[in-house]
Image (cartoon, rainbow, N blue to C red):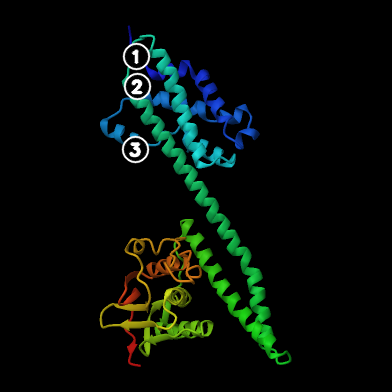
Amino acid sequence: MAHLRLADFIRSNIEAILQAWEDFARTVEPPALTMDDVELRDHARQMLLAVADDLDQPQSEQERVAKSQGLGERERENGHRDTASETHAEARLLSGYTVVQLVSEYRALRSSVLALWDAFTREDRDTDSADMTRFNEAIDQALAESVARYEYLVKKSQNMFLAILGHDLRNPLGAVVMGSSFLMQANDIPHKYALAATRMNSSARRMSSLVNDLIDYTRTHFGANMPIDTRHGDLAIISRQVVEELRTFHPERQIALQVPGSVMTMLDNGRIAQMLSNLIGNAIQYGLVDTPVAVTVLADAGNDIVISINNAGPAIPADKIAGIFDPLVRITQQGGADAGEHTSLGIGLYIARQIAQAHGGRIEVVSGEQDGTTFSVTLPLHRSGLHAA
């Protein structure tokens, strides 16, 4: 008797398999409560037929290993741009499924096929047992495609939300800055109101800086590079301006600046100021209150400019160093009554690194209990312009 292939078994029993899978999908709440039969079976048929077609194709050992790890070549159906598994993930996301529920569907689909196949082979029919291994590999590949597409769409929607939020916050923040600036310049109001306006202005400007970081973050995560407009500028002047602004915002903190009289090079003035503000602000946030933040700018006879920002305080744990520039990573100071205030989403450090890289530079960090934490920015010196202070 000729071997009965699992691919032929799936094609001839597809309705029974789909019914078993649909019965499971109806148990997934709340999405199942709002979905009809067509939606519940939306792409299961296409996925099963794709699996059956895959079983009919010869497969090398390398292809087998890749598919078992979910790394096989994507199989598009009927010339479509996306596979049925990817389209299925998108539909499930729109229907309100969680990724756990999505994975459970594949587990149910696998179980439905194998249960029917087991019942069939128990009748001593002559079958090809290797097909079962191929089937599991194909399901693993389909599952990997679905989860990858689901994760991509979730991240895309999150980034879109952040981008819209950032842009929508710009106008009201601008109104607060303008209004508070107007009150700060007024001479016919009591001093306490002028002081309140000054605090409002400082807070609004800080929020505006955070919004700009948020917009830059979403822009780079949509695949665009950090936009810069380079021209000849003086890094020394930019450094002094940023430090003076931060001294105004944080009058209780000391910021020590060591910089040459002039460091002329090619740079984007606004972006470099943003990078310095983020790095120095991070040092203020995590450094000891009674110890100055040290900012040093060095331009040697070589081709590099090195900017160092050092703060004293507890060392960053070794396992946190590798991910400190990753976006939306929260680094929390351990211990201390004010631990709740010493938190960060990590966007500022991420933006700082993107700005350095856009200028052809890099940022490195070292941290220890004795010397504190030092962020070092290395930028190319495009034109010699170092003058003694």
Residue name at image x 68 percent, y 90 percent: 191
- Residue 111: x %, y % from top left: 45, 25
- The answer for how far apart the CA atoms under marks 3 and 2 are is 17 Å
Label 2 secondary element: helix
Seen in the image, is 112 located left or right of residue 197? left
Q: Quadrant of residue 361?
A: bottom left
Seen in the image, is 103 located left or right of residue 362? right
Q: Nearer the viewer, residue 213 or 105?
A: 105
Q: Quadrant of residue 54?
A: top left
Which numbered circle lies on residue 131? Answer: 2
Which numbered circle lies on residue 160? Answer: none
Count of marks, rendered view: 3
Residue type at numbered disc 2: Asp
Which residue bears the numbered disc 3? 69
- Residue 287: x %, y % from top left: 42, 76
Label 3 secondary element: loop
Residue name at image x 35 percent, y 88 percent: 260
Q: Residue furthest right?
A: 188
Q: Which quadrant is the C terminus positioned in?
A: bottom left
> Marks 2 and 1: CB-CB under 8 Å?
yes
For residue 178, above or below residue 22: below
- Disc 3 crowd rating (10 Å Cα; few below 14, some 14-19, many 20+) is few
